[in-house]
Amino acid sequence: MTLTKRSILTLTILSLAVVTPVWADQSMGPEIPISVLDNQQYNPHVAYNSIRDQYLVVWHNFWGGSRDIYGRRLDGEGNLLSSFTISTGTWDRVQPAVAYDPLNDRYLVVWSYDFHGNGSDWDLYGRLIPWNGPDAGLTEFPIESSTRTQDSPEVDFALAQQEFMVVWNNRGGGIPVDVEGARVQLNGSLIPGVVAVASGGFDRTNPDIAYNLDRNEYLVTYDDNGADILATRLTGNGIILGGGEFGIATWADPESRPSVAACGGGTDRYFVAWQSQISATRNDVYGRFVTGDGVPDGAPLHIPFTGIDEQESEVTCRNGSAEFLVVWEQQYTSTTGAFGIHGSRVSPNGTLSQAFSVRPISVGETGVATRPAAVGGQQGYLVVWEHDRQGTSYQDIHGRMVWGSLFSDGFESGNTNAWSSVSP
């Protein structure tokens, strides 16, 4: 399918139609048991299908042998649809990430693969997944398989460019860790040449990527081995812009694990969130706007915090809404207490909502909710996380819908599927 200038204009006009955020109470759907296999499940990632108002959640599953890549579909109100295996075999497959292609109504799932089965050479693989699940005719393929290790992949889809961009860490060989990328066409074939996003005299780790439709550009964020938050802008075809690497957060405290999102719809801005080590036992979450041309916009924002640990932040946006959502692990009661998931909305002018609990902790619970991921959809956001199943050795994948407005709970239409016993 070819995206014409007219269709690009139509999509842009549609995204411009709603640029004012609708602030609401923190109404949420019920907690969703996305996967409850009697295994240990890790590293959830999620993408939104804008054509069908659905979500695809992916994760890796450890069942006592190798680790495999699994997926499950949900509808726009968080109801569970089909589940399936994406990649399985003798050797480990871990750290999946996913992005959606609305032109072909399918996803690209990428992951790191233990090529020899002994941890000596991890390669990057991917597979195109149709909207309703795997197609036997669309098999997995290598994205990068050099002798160094490729891990921590992230992926986004470039609408105007009509291709995916995958970024990852390239490590090993006695040289600093760098960030590389690859362009993947809609049919899964690679555009030749690795994109050298960032490299030099120190490690660059934990990459993330966001596509800005307003410019047909990307912002790739990463940390310099847990010290500062840095970024590089790329054109839609992978050319470095603006003189290369620049700083987003470079103060004395260690800053790490950045996440980045863009809203589109004429907003032409990114929001970057990260964790900052305040003390030996405490991280706080910060965020900062970055303009489309790569200039930090205003001072860093201290996301609502407590005196205990907040970490592992993720940021997303409802495209065209101009509102970002930041979610993170929130520790309860003490420095050894269990973790839940909290969130805060960020308005275009930098106003932060009060922190709200996506997954609270009950008395006696341990571990519970960690490593959140989130994506914006038509009616709100789907937040997913790793979830300890209490009293067992199993770890599940759970999620919850955070509604985008007071009127997205189905009340007017008579559809009460999204209601919970706590809040509509």
Image: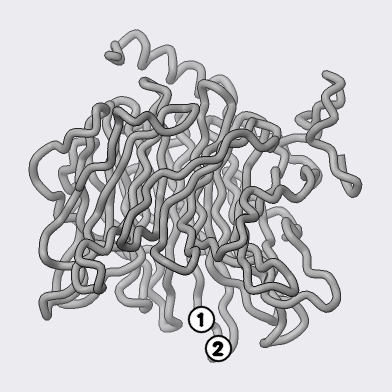
Q: Which quarter of the figure is the C terminus placed in?
A: top right
Res 170 seen here: no
Left/right of residue 260 with respect to residue 221 in the rendered view: right
- Find residue 36 and name its label: none
SS at badge 2: strand
206 and 42: which one is in front? 42
412 and 420: which one is in front? 420
Report the number of discs. 2
Residue at image coords 69%, 50%: 33
Q: Is residue 406 above or below residue 32?
A: above
The answer to which quarter of the image holds residue 55 is top right
Residue at image coords 80%, 32%: 417
Residue at image coords 32%, 76%: 225
Other residues around mark 2 within 10 Å, as few (<14) / some (14–19) / many (≥20): few
Other residues around mark 1 within 10 Å, as few (<14) / some (14–19) / many (≥20): many
Q: Which residue is mark 1?
A: 277
Whole-Å distance between the Cαs marked 1 and 2? Answer: 6 Å
SS at badge 1: strand
**Residue 409 x %, y %:** 80, 32
Inspect the image, locate mark 2, and give the three-letter code of the amino acid beneath it.
Answer: Ser
Q: Is residue 39 above or below residue 157?
A: below
- Find residue 279 and name its label: 2
The answer to which quarter of the image holds residue 153 is bottom left
Q: Which quarter of the figure is the N terminus placed in?
A: top left
**Residue 289 x %, y %:** 47, 52
Q: Is residue 233 above or below residue 279?
A: above
Res 104 seen here: yes
**Residue 7 x %, y %:** 37, 11
Left/right of residue 384 with respect to residue 125 in the rendered view: right
CB within 8 Å, label 1 to label 2: yes
